[in-house]
Amino acid sequence: MAVKRTDALDRYRRHITAEWDAAALYNGLADLSRGRRKDVLAELAGIEEKHAAFWSDKMVEHGGTPPDRDEFSPSERTLSLLDTARRYSTDLVLPIVEQDERDAVDDYKAEPDAPAFMLEDEAGHARALAELLKESADAVGSDPTDEGWHRTDKSGALRAGIFGINDGLVSNTALVMGFAGAGAGRETVLFAGLAGLLAGAFSMAAGEYISMVNQREAFEREIELEREEIELHPEDEQRELELIYEAKGLDRAVAAEVAAGVMSDKEVALDTMAREELGLDPDDLGSPYGAAVSSFLAFSLGAVLVVLPYLVAGGTVAFVVAVVLALLALATVGGVMARLNGRAPARGVARQVAVGVAAAGGTYLFGTLFGVTVG
């Protein structure tokens, strides 16, 4: 009986800290948001706090002592997600949190003391987050104030990093497998892998640099065009801003008052219109150097894995270890990409592994059939 009581108290304690952690995440995301999204996230944080209070009461009911709220610190994962949201966008984090809420429903289904309302709350959280993401997606391209010469497909170092790892892993694994299939010696395979790593990394970095330079110049031009619009047609721009605030839920009179206040200072007006209408942060238009370095390092990280075994061994041993490392890396990348997209990890892992195996298997078969060797 004592064992069951101890197990229950341990479960309650885990639930309390998990709910506090979720509340900290929602509060942090709310601080980075505005309008309806801010309100929804703050409300979700409050519900998580109520869940924690429920489990605290359960601990007391069973003779335990709940953890001290003042001694709680958010988990490293929560701090990392908030840092990602702060650096890039809350849109990047919300799909992960949505999946966490769906997982929480499954966790509470296995908890015998979880009340029905708590499962309903967690499922409701997932639906609320999905709705926020849908609203964000609908806002792009459907804003009544959109103007034809604006584009808001912002990207940067994070995107370059994610795709760089994937490209480096798949391309260099395929290259090394091709040479291994041809029966090339260890030195040849190693040289080919390192050459592929450097060539691909420099190519990716150069491509990202040029792409980001052009994109930044395009964004700067859009902001400059917006500046001209504010100078030449301030009444039209003020009305556009009113519509934006009305779409966010403000009363028409309040929206008009706020818009008039913003437009009274041209620099504030430009900064606001850039953020609200164009979806751009004038202080963070993307760094070409950051994207290039991120891309170079990410491609190298993905590409080096299959080369490592050949640094210390050769023949069958190096080949088998290289294949295992490549499969593990492909599964990891697939899982991470699925989580970022709010999809089931298993599906992302299966797809990534299938694509990688197809690419590497094709070059290995090519090398085996043609018996290409490098002297």
Image (tube, helix red, strand yellow):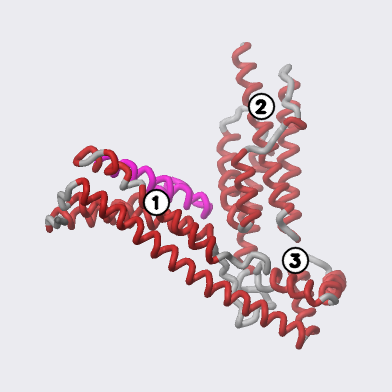
Percent coordinates x, y for residue 285 in the rendering: 61, 67
In the rendered image, the vertical position of residue 250 relative to residue 33, given as above or below: below
Does label 3 or label 1 sit earlier along the sequence?
Answer: 3
Asked whether residue 209 is in view, the answer is: yes
Percent coordinates x, y for residue 26 in the rendering: 69, 47
Q: Are marks 2 and 1 in contact (CB under 8 Å)?
A: no
Amino acid under label 3? Lys
The chief SS type of the magenta part is helix
Task: Give the residue at x 74% y 55%.
Answer: 38
Q: Which residues are magenta?
A: 320-349
Give how far apart the Cα atoms at labels 3 and 2 are: 39 Å
Q: Categorize mark 1 by other alpha carbons within 10 Å: few (<14), some (14-19), many (20+).
A: many
Question: Could you tell whether 204 is left or right of 56 in the image?
Answer: left
Give how far apart the Cα atoms at labels 2 and 1 are: 41 Å
Question: Could you tell whether 50 is left or right of 103 in the image?
Answer: right
Question: Could you tell whether 107 is left or right of 180 in the image?
Answer: right
Percent coordinates x, y for residue 318 in the rendering: 25, 41
User: Which is more toward the observer, 188 or 144?
Assistant: 188
Check if residue 121 falls in the magenta segment: no
Residue under label 3, please give it: 248
Asked whether residue 358 is in view, the answer is: no
Residue under label 2, please give it: 12
User: Which is more toward the observer, 216 or 276?
Assistant: 216
Which corner quadrant holds the C terminus? bottom left
Check if residue 347 falls in the magenta segment: yes
